[in-house]
Image (cartoon, rainbow, N blue to C red):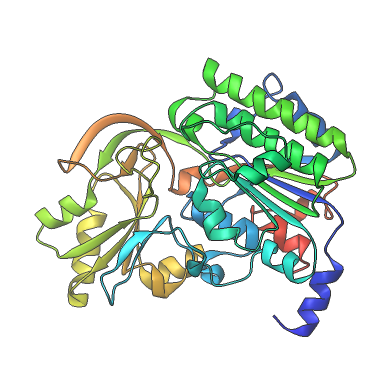
Amino acid sequence: MSEKTKKKTKKNLHEKTLIIVIDGCAIDYITKKTTPNLYRLAENGFYKTVKSALPSVTNVNHACILSGSFPSNHGVVGNYYYNRKTGEEGFIESSRHMKVDSIIDIYAKAGKSTALLTVKGKVLEVFGQNAQIGINLQKPDAAILEKFALPQPPDDVASFATYDWIFNACYNVINIANPDLVYCTTNDFMMHNYAPNTKEAETTMRTMDEWIGKIYDIDPEREIYITADHGMNEKNRVIDLQKKLDAAGYETFCLLALKDRYMDNHKYQEGGLVYVYVFDEKKISKVMKYLKGCDFVEKVLDNESAAKKYNLPSDNIGDILVLSKSDTAFGELEKDELTVKVRTHGSLDERKIPLIAVNARKNKSHYKFSADIVKVMLGL
């Protein structure tokens, strides 16, 4: 970062800011019936639809929101990684995958206080190393719990109780420590399992909405942004693309962008985007032709086209990007295909997300992507 950019960034750091990311919150979950406080904030600010980055998965979009940039810049392209040169693969659970500073890093360098609160432990591990206050529901720190008067968190991440707990933590942190920047995010357990019009979904949304109302009332002048990392949709077909390509005689590695440890949310690791690494580059065109003939595929792009169209880093997305049709997801199966109802994300269909803002420093026309929240905050 140049000295000019540093000075501009420092000038743009407001006194108190809260960013809430409701994991998997599709637009349809927000209604006047279940989330009246969100509408109350919107009346004093704005509510609009924006886009997440692609792939529409958790790690990618936390990286986008926190850095104010796209994967082509920050380098995070999924929840899972594969190193073509070494054959190494694994879950993205450390900060080494992030190639740029997040707003938390920038605030820390500027001497401002920050807090990152998360249900999913990986979010703190990847993005919160420089947060002054880090609260991880999965690995609670006894001293932190005592300092912020918090009960022991729920034992299971895949539970409704996590929503109440993490917002209670957010409320207490703001009340007690009042950091300059608070970043609070949930799990998407409810969204993976319950459609917007179900009793479970409505109850969960009311719980979050009540806490958000209380948090807003602490300081109505606080700059607040409420968004999602991705949406959520129902699918009725899961395809194991690796098995399909193996059976067709192609030697490949299929990287599922959504794949992570949270199997309660998606037991087949099912999501809408796959990066395909073709071991024999001479066969890339043949693999693409095969994929374009599959009835479950929405789009097939080569490396260069995918990088350009979706702001992805060309050195980290394989040879081919494959997007599923709206009723289909890619996963890991015992067979190559399964007819089953699942709720999941990752594709183009889950990019549409809400943005509710109050005391935002720009009018709503400046916000087209969730990444624009921090982009605007940093004056980039």
Instruction: Identify which residue is drawn at 42% across, 73% down.
Output: 314
Picture quarter with the C terminus: bottom right
Q: Is residue 215 above or below residue 124?
A: above
Frontmost residue, 45 versus 136: 136
Frontmost residue, 25 versus 89: 89
Instruction: Look at the image and tell me whether residue 231 can be seen.
Output: yes
Frontmost residue, 190 versus 262: 262
Q: Residue furthest bottom?
A: 3
Q: Is residue 281 above or below residue 346?
A: below
Rendering coords of residue 213 (x, y %): 78, 30
Q: Is residue 327 left or right of residue 247?
A: right
Q: Is residue 334 left or right of residue 198?
A: left
Rendering coords of residue 350 (x, y %): 49, 43
Instruction: Look at the image and tell me whether residue 357 can be seen.
Output: no
Instruction: Identify which residue is drawn at 42% across, 66% down.
Output: 306
Rendering coords of residue 321 (x, y %): 35, 61
Q: Residue furthest top?
A: 199
Picture quarter with the N terminus: bottom right
Q: Is residue 332 left or right of residue 313?
A: left
Instruction: Identify which residue is drawn at 74% across, 33% down.
Output: 212
Rendering coords of residue 235 (x, y %): 36, 34
Count of numbered circles on the image: 0
Q: Is residue 269 left or right of residue 159?
A: left
